[in-house]
Amino acid sequence: MKQSAIWKNIRLFSWRSVFFRYLFSLMFIILLIFVPYTMIIYYVSDDMLASEISAQSSSNALKSKMIFDLLNSSFANHYALAADSTDAAAFLSAEERGIPAAETLSVQNLLRSIKRSDESVEEIMVYSTINKNFITTDRIAAYDGSEPETWINTYRASKLPFLMFPRKLHSDSFDSIFTVQELYDKAGRTIGIFCIQSRYRDFEEMVRQSFGEDPDRIFIVSDLGLILYSNEYSRINTLMFEDPDIYSAFLSAKETEGSTLFWGDSIISVAKSGDSDLILMSFTSRAKILGGYHWLNFLMGIGSMLVLLVAMISALFIAVNHYRSVSSVLRAIQDTEDPDALGKSRLRSEFFYIIHSVASSANKNQELDGELAETIRRLKHAQFCELQAQINPHFVFNTLQLINLSILRETHADTPATRLISLFSQLLHSAYDTDNVIVTVEEEIQNLRTFTEIQSIRYKGRLKTDFQIDEACLSYCTLKLMLQPFAENCMVHGFCSDGREWRLRMTCILQNGNLIFTISDNGCGIPPDQLREIRQKLKSPNIAGQNIGISNVNQRLFLLFGTRSSVQVDSKPGEGTSITIRHPARKDHPMDRVNNRLTGTHPL
């Protein structure tokens, strides 16, 4: 066929032309080969750069650790002198009324000697946890709680075997850092603590000298997350978890030893002090380190553009050659039919025109029937999801966990409030999982138990529940959150405020191939007129207005099980209310049967 005929057909069908399907498909195939190859080269080079950066950062971190441990080794030497002193052991283990004076003066002289040997030390202290007396280089006194001894108060509050913390003692900035470690007797029992007060500026200078270049952010952190040093001054003496971003990096750094951690857009060099359980974290911008390698990214960009250009030219050449066969078919049809027919089909592609020239009306009807069935299936599925979504609570689990942690920090113990939050979080987790609208009877009963426990705490034990569940029912499938709306109605509308004990009874049995759930209470009952209204509501497809919860459950049961499911409400004023829910017992997933029912492949 002449070349002009090919381009004529392409112009006629415009962007719907099969030619463009050929063109884009071939270009995609070519790109599928070239692009991964280019990406592999890029990532290999990037990985090599990252490895080099990692090695350099690890080297810096290890150098920092050596300087870091040098300071800790000084404290360890001083601590060893006090721990090995028999006079110190005698002072620490003595009873309150039997403190030996000679040993006490000997311990004080030892502390003075240690202080003279180390210029960075401001003060050295020893405190006995047995007789509550302490010795410093300047004084010997009994601790009665009124002394402004920061190091003793902090230790008594934390009870940790080792801790470090900065303090502002003589100015508005941090000027001292305390290092505290427990002292033990030969049996391994804690008999006191050893504390060194050092100049904070010496600590800062040590950190600065450990880096050849200043990182973007530096943190010296205790094992518990207390920030002892940071080049962001406002962060000193705060806790890492106050900033979720760096706290996540801190948790990862705790699992890293003397190496590099890639975190977001930063590279973190990590060093640990084995003697003091401290962690050094230095954040450096990845872009800052990789700044000298922009030329490589430029070359990769140029290469990608060349790959794209080659792919387009190759795809165009191959598509034109493949389109010749399509043009030949079109010409044959034009020769045997109305020459203007092709011109009337501008909104159709060539294949569409060819197929509809030979297809029968039966095929068209079959296509329409298939589209209608698919539309009905999607509408039914959307209706089911909408009904389920109406009772899904939209709360944020992280907020509940934060409230729970805040209460625990204030009370230092579990309380009814923390229990309520935990139970409510469990119930929300089940309700929010809209992907699994079907659960086992065992899971549904557990959801109801969680709900009733919340209500029992709310009503201060006035509510008593009785669960009688046949174990044969537990493995069958049922509708999630089906029982909770009925139990809630019993509590909100059924129970009277006459002071008597409220009882809620839940049973489940397997009978004649059906699961039968019964929820009953000893409340005030439902008036006859209102009972008739509720029963009428259960027959209506409209779930708006009052009793939306039970109507919602009834509609979802109907979508799953059809007319073989039912919800029955019985009540006698002054005696209580009973709700009976019935649906077929199935161990396979009912949603599969719903899909079959909607497509007409198998009846439910």
Image (cartoon, rainbow, N blue to C red):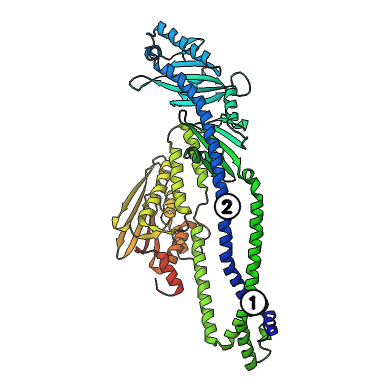
Between 570 and 65, the residue placed more toward the observer is 65
Can you tell which mark lies on residue 45? 2
Residue 462 x/y as whole percent: 39, 42
Residue 574 visible at all: no
Between 100 and 454, the residue placed more toward the observer is 100
Residue 143 x/y as whole percent: 46, 14
Left or right: 175 as drawn, with respect to 553: right
Q: Determine whether the residue tagged by mark 1 lies in a helix, strand or loop.
A: helix
Between 592 and 91, the residue placed more toward the observer is 91
- Quick check: 530 above or below 397? below
| Furthest residue in direction top, as rendered | 102
Image quarter (top left, top right, bottom left or bottom right) of the N terminus: bottom right
Q: Determine whether the residue tagged by mark 2 lies in a helix, strand or loop.
A: helix
Residue 361 x/y as whole percent: 55, 87
Q: How far apart are marks 1 and 2 (CA)?
A: 42 Å
- Residue indicated by mark 1: 16
Between 425 and 556, the residue placed more toward the observer is 425
- Quick check: 564 above or below 146? below
Q: Which one is earlier in the sequence, the residue at label 1 or at label 2?
A: 1
Residue 332 x/y as whole percent: 62, 90
